[in-house]
Image (cartoon, rainbow, N blue to C red):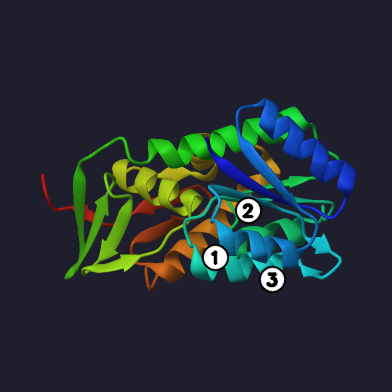
Amino acid sequence: MKLIYVVEDHDVIRNGVVQYLGLSGFSAEGCGNLESAREAFKKQVPDMLIQDVMLPDGDGFNFVKEIRAKWPRLPIIFMTARIDESDRILGFELGCDDYITKPFSPKELVLRVQALFRRVDDSGKDTECKRYMLGSSVLVIDEDEHKLTIDDEEIQLTAAEWRIVAYLATNSPNLISRSQILDECFDYSFESYERVVDTHIKNIRAKLKGDGWIETVRGYGYRFAGKRADK
């Protein structure tokens, strides 16, 4: 049973989310502040974190940054009243996999949780190890181990970043639109979320040490520039 931590200071919201997740087949534990969340992580690392932003003892954005440094692959969903696009973009820049704003339907939240777990679980079904070349550099996507390396150095990616890289590489050298990335890698597609794709690409490029691996096609989307080396 998947373990989910729900960090939310509003008792009714926290307890309602925990109860609904439990009825949906998950093991959920609530934390009313960041201190209790940190203590919970010391005891056991969950399979997913659902994180509020405005908490009585700190900022959820900063907490997620702290968590990402230790557990880069942990699936994270922000659940917050911060509805501005700049806040949503900041959340994705910090490495969250999804962002849901209050008020929300508990059913929608569960659907997003299920979709995120599905993306994480599906990433290891293809056991083929794929190698790509860009100049003298070698990028390896090992889907069995859920690992990506460049010149034998492992690159830590979030679940969303992993899906995007794998999707772009698998479809290389085709041009891929932002809406296609949303449809295939996020299970939802809204025009306002297309900037989220750009944010993920920005983060991926930083981790891949440059934008050479992923080309921007202005007015359309992106294309993976690496050439398959193991065919």
Query: Dot 2: what SS?
Result: helix
Toward the front, the furthest residue is: 43
Q: Amino acid at mark 1?
A: Arg
- Residue to which mark 2 is pinned: 195
Q: Are marks 1 and 2 in contact (CB under 8 Å)?
A: no
Which numbered disc, 1 or 2, marks the residue closer to the eye? Answer: 1
Q: Is residue 173 visible?
A: no
Nearer to the camera, 109 or 216: 109
Residue 113, how many percent across, how many down?
A: 61, 37
The 10 Å Cα crowd at callout 1, few under 14, some 14 to 19, many 20 or more, is some
Residue 132, how many percent across, how many down?
A: 21, 56
The 10 Å Cα crowd at callout 3, few under 14, some 14 to 19, many 20 or more, is few
Chain-order first, disc 3 or disc 1: 3
Q: Are marks 2 and 3 in contact (CB under 8 Å)?
A: no
Residue 217 picture quarter: bottom left
Label 1, label 2: how far apart the Cα atoms are: 21 Å
Residue 97, how many percent across, how many down?
A: 58, 50
Which numbered disc, 2 or 3, marks the residue closer to the eye? Answer: 3
Query: Dot 3: what SS?
Result: helix
Residue 225 in the image: above or below residue 186: below
Indicate the quadrant containing the C terminus: top left, top right, bottom left or bottom right: top left
Identify the residue at horizontal 80%, vertical 45% (top origin).
14
- Residue to which mark 3 is pinned: 62
Nearer to the camera, 219 or 64: 64
Chain-order first, disc 1 or disc 2: 1
Q: Amino acid at mark 3?
A: Asn
Which disc, if any, is residue 68? 1
